[in-house]
Amino acid sequence: MSSENKQILTTDGIPLEVSLKKAEKKNKIKAFLLVAPLLLFIIITYVFPIGDMLMRSVDDKMVTEMLPKTYKSMETWDGQELPPEEVFEAFYFDFQKLIEEEREGKLSTQLNYTKNGFKSIIKKLRRKSKSFEEGNYKEQIMAVHKRWADVEYWRAIKRRAPAYTYQKYLKGMDMYENEKGKIVNVAEDRRVHRILWLRTLEIAFFVTVFCFLMAYPIAHLLATLPMKYSNLLMICVLLPFWTSLLVRTASWMILLQQQGIVNDFFVMIGLVSDDNRIEMMFNKTGSYVAMTQILLPFMVLPLYSVMKTISPSLMRAGKSLGGTPFIAFWKVYFPLTIPGIGAGCLLVFILAIGYYITPALVGGASGTLISNQIAFHMKSTLDWSFASAMGLMLLSGVLVIYWLYNKLVGIDNIKLG
Amino acid sequence: MALPKYTETHYRIWHYIYLTICAAVFFFLIAPLFVIFPLSFNAEEFLVFSDGMKRLDPDAFSLRWYQDMIYGTKNPWGLAAKNSFIIAIFATIGSVLLGTVAALGLSSRHMPYKGLIMAVLISPMIVPLIISGVAIFFFMAKAGLAATHTGIVLAHIVLGTPFVVITVTATLSGFDHSVTRAAASLGSNPVNTFMKITLPLILPGVISGGLFAFVTSFDEVVVVLFLAGLENTTIPIQMWTGLREQLSPTILAVATCLIVLSTLILVTAELLRRRSERLRGINQ
């Protein structure tokens, strides 16, 4: 007999296999349709905008579009000596058009990012160019300011020709592309961003370590105490967890100030003299203390949920087999808590690395993180493409940890409250 | 945690050291919150305990900062509170609707690409807020929604849905799907089954997800800093400005109110969690 004869048919006469597949497909579509609204919403309002950030961070069309003729005439210029008359002429006409549209200010800001000193000479050119005569633009422009006769500045303009650039990313790592197209470090005293990246990593790392050291004993206590006591103590963990971040930061500002309670206490026990109170706020100490307390619940909760599942009889078995309590703990209990440790540490590290509010309020100049720099460029310097570039550099780091977290813990295992 | 009688002395000592460490950590966690409470009743303008307060002199305490919070002419707390509540309520409704429906789909075993989609949906919770803030700001500026309530509500829905998705999928993981099949076999249509059978069973999870979404929105400051205009100021924005410029006791009065609010939310969330565990048959 062939296998087809054995095929089971449904009452409609359709093979069961086909019918099942159809039903399966229908269920798949049903499930997907339920998720679709949120997925679409998140993609439109969140995933695309992050893509937009990426575009902004590499987008350099602005200058390219402002000086179309100049860049066309520059194509044949080798960049060794001053460009020929036709480049100056093209630049003059591009510039006149910008003045008409009142966009020359933007050009000067943009070019100034590439090379300092453009701002003043563009202003001067704007004034003088009104009285320019036709022809021989090279000499006329060069006469406006000696920098216009400096080939370095023309090279700087040429460097802005491509529509896309990775300059902002280099800047985020304190590097730049020099005149010869080589990537070099900026002068040592101007390497601000590298310090910030390192400090962000350092603070996030130590906050994670402190959180772990503090969370482990209390998570253990919470998991081993009888329910009626542990529920009460759990409130000590959950109340800060549910309280506004700003409220908690405010309380640290009160505690850590020079006339604050912590300093009062130090004076009382004679650790420091009254006129020699410790500065604990507006520096790294402030960031460390406040961030550790604020992120502590995020370490306690995953540890607690893992420890809760460990049977106390395991420790007893370890001890009865001749281990001291310490050996039993180290060889039996501790290895079982590693999943919780991984989850808690990754979560705290991810949250700490992107912290903004608390460092901005209690961190001062020496305790601020990379997020503060991003906010600074968004709000103060308005260099949005640089802010985007740094944001994406931070994001790529976070995504690596997120991926790791997903591998080790699984995102659907995140426990809340 | 009484130790058995036969415990050796040095383990006994270790045990007490361990308990002391735990007590210190609990103190570190909870004590800062209690500093705010007495200081908000300070009669003076300074943020330190005055001598009168240390002597518990009734004259050293007053309600003037609470009066200032409510009636103060220059104080924008009224507007901020109104905005905060409006934004948080609409953001919660949006997050709960979108998140619950998505969680239903995600917990179906037929869902394709479950891991990937889940990762995308949860990402607003993981990505640093400053990056979310910048990205959402670019979007809202393009859509013409910057400095509007709508824009902020949409942004907070993005930030709030991961919590709803997580809590509701967790509740659904212990859900017995045969009850919905039973309802269907008795002739109920899917909508009716959801409203009468599924929803009442997963309601604790939905509400606690909603509480998370509410708190996220109510407490959120980074994204709002980018999006808000003067008209959309919220309580966190006002606190942020206040803390940056000058720490005034009025802020402590507001902070005390917020602590009371978070205590209420905590109690509700805890009761719901226990109810949910009971319903799912997890008895401890």
Image (tube, helix red, strand yellow):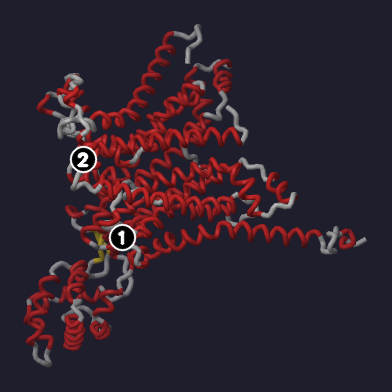
Write down the quadrant of residue A172 in the picture: bottom left
Q: Which mark is residue B258?
A: none
Provide residue A109's location: percent of width, then percent of height: 19, 69
**What residue would you read off at disc 1?**
B147
Q: Amino acid at mark 2?
A: Asp
Q: Which residue occupies 11% across, 90% down?
A: A136
Write down the quadrant of residue A378 in the picture: bottom left
> What chain is tagged by disc 1?
B
Question: Is there one chain holding both mark 1 and mark 2?
Answer: yes
Q: In the picture shown, does residue B198 fall above or below A154? A: above
Cα separation, mark 1 vs mark 2, equals: 27 Å
Provide residue B205's location: percent of width, then percent of height: 53, 42
Nearer-N-terminus badge (1/2):
2
**What residue would you read off at disc 2?**
B68
Q: Which residue occupies 84% across, 63% down?
A: A12
Provide residue A211's location: percent of width, then percent of height: 37, 34
Write down the quadrant of residue A93 in the picture: bottom left
- Secondary element under disc 1, as helix, strand or loop, is loop
- Secondary element under disc 2, as helix, strand or loop, is helix
Quadrant containing the N terminus of chain A is bottom right
Residue A255, visible in the rendered structure: no
Provide residue B261's location: percent of width, then percent of height: 37, 37
**Farthest residue toward the bottom?**
A134
Instruction: State the residue in front, A116 or B29.
Output: B29
Residue B239, visible in the rendered structure: yes
> What chain is tagged by disc 2?
B
Q: Amino acid at mark 1?
A: Ala
